[in-house]
Image: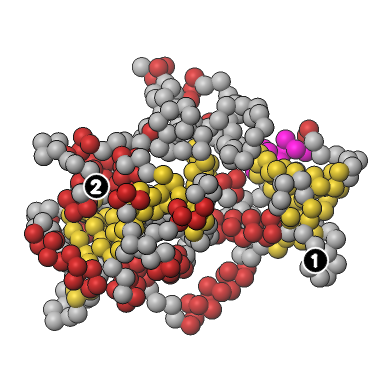
Amino acid sequence: MATFFGEVVVAPSRAGLDEEEEAREETPEDREIRRELEKKREIDVLWTWQSGGRAEEPLVCSRFIVAIGRNAAAFLSSFILDSVCWEVVGVVKLWNEWCRTSSTTNVLPTDSFCLFYRLISDPTVLLCQCSCYVAEDQQFQWLEKVFGSMQKKGLQVTILSTCPVADYKTQESTLTLVSPFLKALKTKEFQEQVCCPLLEQPNIVRDLPAA
Amino acid sequence: MFVPCDRGGGSAAADFKGFTLLMPAVSVGNVGQLAIDLVISTLDMTKVGYFYTDCLVPMVGNNPYATAEENSTELSINAEVYSLPSRKLVVLQIRSPFIKNKYRPFCETLLSWVKSSKCARVVLLSSSHAYQRDDEQLLGTPLRYLLTPDLEKAVGGLMKELNWKEMEKVAAYPGISDTDKVLHIPGGGITKLLFTESCSEGIQMAVLLKFCSEGDNIPDAFILVNYLNEWLQLIKSEVSNPSSQWKIPSSWRLLFGNGLPPALF
């Protein structure tokens, strides 16, 4: 790509990574390094009823509310969660370049954490606060490990998340938009009334909420 | 990997025996993916399933090919499969980049799905960095093709008739003469890997690619899809304006940002 001053600049490709790295055959050392990195980036989902061993039975869950990102997590902390009606039942331990969470359930709002709560009066209602960033290569793992612990029949999942208004694609400028505003995406199996308009093309959702 | 949609037709929709699989490589300018969007949108193809894979960055949105209020609310994710049985065509669309270290696992799983679903051949739409062309490649057409040996036998003659140019091999060690020539597709994403794997697995694969740069790649997509059409004849194209017959999907709106704030002026 030529610039005004005449030098050629390599523009970052929208297509993603340069494939040359990938096409190279792995040496045993490369493989070892990759395995170590993968192990470091593994996610552990720890449920409170596990005492050393794995939980045998899948968790019976009728409603699962997941809040992803600091804003959504703060919303749940401010309006829904309290120590009387909700109890902590699980935690996700992970590490990536952006954050590290621990297995402690005693967290500050400014920490990065991913905790699961259960409604004491109805233990099939589960809530997750995920204020940490789950990296691209960990999102699928998170999904499989969390949902793998649940029985999914009759399960209704609600995902709460936030995006910057500047990312919203619309004909008018976002400066004139009244914000904040809500948009929704739903599967065709979701038959109930949605409380806000659906997300219009060409807007998309990415990362953990998308996964 | 492939998860069929429940459409009442049961598993009949997932039978791709003898079909041509058309798919993009996630490559420079996303030209292959844009071209595939044009194919799916113009031929009004039906979604028959998706790939459940950990190899691509997750994304979700509403139907990118929506034409009206009624069909605009179907969810769409990063790897979906569409089909047009009347043309024996099945199309895979990929909508997000690959996750690091996942090129090879994806290619392996994809090719094993191609074999198990008994697709007759695969056509891969791709692109390569224009700035990496050598002096000869700078002249003439920016379009190239590649055929695996198995497909060469079937359609090699047709390519010659169409006067298509095969992708040149380059010296393995530039500057040193007498060295082996290798295939080099910079910016092509999984193109080279998928092609070399298909050669060794005996899969009939064709790669159609265009040299381009990042920028507004819509014209590149039209050129690539018209190139494809010369061979597969998916639509009747007018000689005077071959691009007019392709339908642009609604998701192509606002590719370069929102409207400007009036206060700017």
Please state the horizontal and vertical placement of residue B157, each as a whole percent of the image. Answer: 12, 65
Return the residue nearer the eye: A96 or B206: B206
Q: Which quadrant would residue B122 be assigned to in this image?
A: bottom left
Q: Residue at x 51, y 46 (%)?
A: B7
**Boundaries of the magenta span:** A69-77
> In the displayed structure, would residue A188 be above or below residue A194?
below
Label disc, if present, on residue A56 of the rendered structure: 1
Q: Nearer the viewer, mark 2 or mark 1?
A: 2
B75 relative position to B115: left or right: right
Same chain for mark 2 and mark 1? The answer is: no
Q: Is residue A70 magenta?
A: yes
Q: Residue at x 53, y 32 (%)?
A: A199
Chain ID of residue with mark 1: A
Mark 1 is surrounded, within 10 Å at the Cα level, by few (under 14), some (14 to 19) or many (20 or more) other residues, namely few
Amino acid type, callout 2:
Leu
Q: Residue at x 75, y 38 (%)?
A: A76
Q: Secondary structure at mark 1?
A: loop
Chain ID of residue with mark 2: B
Mark 2 is surrounded, within 10 Å at the Cα level, by few (under 14), some (14 to 19) or many (20 or more) other residues, namely some
Label disc, if present, on residue B234 of the rendered structure: 2
Please state the horizontal and vertical placement of residue B17, each as a whole percent of the image. Answer: 37, 62
> In the displayed structure, would residue B133 be above or below residue B105?
above
In this rendering, does residue A21 appear at all? no
B122 relative position to B235: left or right: right
Q: Secondary structure at mark 2?
A: loop
Amino acid type, callout 1:
Glu
A168 relative position to B213: left or right: right
Please state the horizontal and vertical placement of residue A166, each as a whole percent of the image. Answer: 49, 32
